[in-house]
Image (cartoon, grey):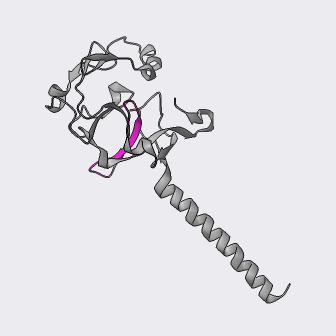
Amino acid sequence: MTQKQTKNEFWSWFKVIGIAIIFTMSVRYFILSPVVVKGASMEPTFETGDKVIVNKVGPRITNYDRFDVIVFETKEDKHYIKRIIGLPGDHVAYKDDVLFINGEAFDEPYLTEYKEGLLDKGDFTYDFTLEEQLEEMTVPEGHFFVLGDNRRRSIDSRSSDIGFVSQDTILGTTDFILWPFERLGSTH
């Protein structure tokens, strides 16, 4: 092999590796991003140490649905993972461990496993209304009311530190555990 052939082969590999790096970084920063779950606020859906994939594109990023799990950023540049409960215009309340949205009771099957495991059999989600928690009648436009699945140990929209989550602070949705392998897969 001549020196020119070696040089051309080197540059060919360099281009392939460069394109692969650019592609990987583009996917990582603009399409899908891994996030490590910290804390118990989303148990049992997500546990501390789970690595999840955050989807940053597509219709689910501009049109969020009730019960989507989102990752959002707070004022302190912290990332939180929570479940959307209230959409803009919704009135949200809890009474006797039942979720009411606009006066209608909603089932939350993702909480069943956790509720059944409670030793004290008390309310899993304590009674509240938006008026009591955030002094608002409904969720404001462009915002969401979010709760962690582990209602007793979650800092979420019930706290004035979080409050309503602006759509502008949402990084994306997640429902896929990447790691650990024994939990690999969708949470649906």
Count up the numbered dots.
0
Residue 185 falls in image quadrant: top right
Q: Residue at x 78, y 88 (%)?
A: 4
Q: Is residue 79 left or right of residue 25?
A: left
x, y percentage for residue 106? 35, 18
- The image quadrant that residue 24 belongs to is bottom right
Which quarter shows the N terminus?
Answer: bottom right
Q: Residue furthest right?
A: 1
Would you say 169 lies left or right of 23 here? left
**Residue 66 is inside the magenta segment:** yes
Query: Does residue 61 lie above or below 126 as drawn?
Result: below
The magenta segment: 64-77
Q: Where residue 174 sits: x, y (%)?
A: 46, 40
Residue 69 location, x and y as percent? 41, 36
Give the residue displayed 19% in from the left and 30% down from the top: 138
- Residue drawn 47% across the image and 37% down it: 48
Against 114, is 10 above or below? below
The residue at 59%/39% (across/down) is 180
Between 80 and 121, the one nearer to me in the picture: 80
Residue nearer the viewer, 110 or 27: 27
| Up/down of 19 relative to 71, above or below | below
Whether the magenta-drawn stretch holds residue 86 is answered as: no
Q: In the depicted view, which residue is nearer to us: 59 or 134?
A: 59
Image coordinates of residue 109 in percent, x first then y, are 44, 19
Q: Main secondary structure of the magenta part?
A: loop
In this rendering, position of residue 10 left or right of residue 58: right
